[in-house]
Image (cartoon, helix red, strand yellow):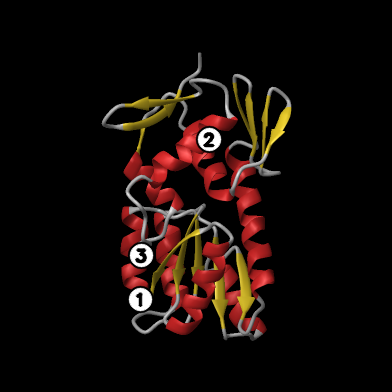
Amino acid sequence: MQVLLIEDDDSLAQGVKTSLMREGFAVNHLTHGKLAVSSIENECPDIVILDLGLPDIDGNDVLRLIRKINGELPVLILTARTSLEDKITGLDAGADDYLAKPFEMPELLARLRVFERRLSTSKHSELRIGEVCLDNTAHQITVSGEGVDLPRREFMLLKALMENVGRVQTRESLESKLYSWGEEVVSNAIEVHIHHLRKRLPDNFIKTVRGVGYTVKVK
């Protein structure tokens, strides 16, 4: 799950980024609103966390521009502006949620999990291909009715493949879903995740397209 954090306080941003990455989120961080809007135009994240007090443009204006690009992208405002009027302005501008600073990380994580559940429900609450069933809402995998425990990144990798059944996913596109910008990724990280997944899934469930990437096909 890709999160774009738009926050000009570097120390706060690094703390949030570290905590979210520890929970398995891929987090990218930008400090300026205009650059964030351009980034979303080029590659839309799954969730946006937006500070209002940005150095180049007010966060509410950033939010309005985001809504012109994507009306469904979940946006959580994270700000020191705590008045009722500020909250109403942010929500009217298109925010899905509003969290005042200072805040506790468990609360931010809980709110992001709500976004995750909404996204899963709006897309596919359950993906079933052959003997493999992926429950987006419960974050559970079953194979032939038996539960399979997967680390978060491998769950998200399998989800990306199953959501694109029949379409080849390149290693680069899969890395972008699992890792943050600038995060050190070993050259064979995706291959290692695929290897672990294959040990838990039916034979030939994930197919390698040599020189291109990976795919799941309906038999």
Q: Position of residue 187 (x, y in %)?
A: 32, 48
Kindly identify the residue that appears in the image at 42 percent across and 55 percent down. Answer: 179
Q: Secondary structure at mark 2?
A: helix
Label tally: 3
Q: Is residue 191 above or below residue 219?
A: below
**Residue at image mark 1:** 32
| Residue 105 appears left or right of 36 | right
Kindly identify the residue that appears in the image at 55 percent across and 31 percent down. Answer: 199
Binning the other alpha carbons within 10 Å of mark 2 as few (below 14), some (14 to 19) or many (20 upward) gives some
Residue 9 visible in this rendered orientation of the protein: no
Nearest to the eye among marks 2 and 1: give it.
Answer: 2
Binning the other alpha carbons within 10 Å of mark 1 as few (below 14), some (14 to 19) or many (20 upward) gives many
Alpha-carbon distance for marks 2 and 3?
35 Å
Alpha-carbon distance for marks 2 and 1?
38 Å
Could you say which is closer to the camera, residue 92 or residue 7?
Answer: 7
Q: Amino acid at mark 3?
A: Val
Q: Position of residue 26 (x, y in %)?
A: 47, 58
Q: Amino acid at mark 1?
A: His
Nearest to the eye among marks 2 and 3: give it.
Answer: 2
| Residue 34 appears left or right of 60 | left
Could you say which is closer to the camera, residue 106 or residue 69?
Answer: 106
Using the rendered view, name the quadrant where residue 41 is placed: bottom left
**Residue at image mark 3:** 37
Using the rendered view, name the quadrant where residue 202 is placed: top right
Q: Position of residue 102 (x, y in %)?
A: 63, 84
**Residue at image mark 2:** 197
Kindly identify the residue that appears in the image at 49 percent across and 70 percent down. Answer: 17
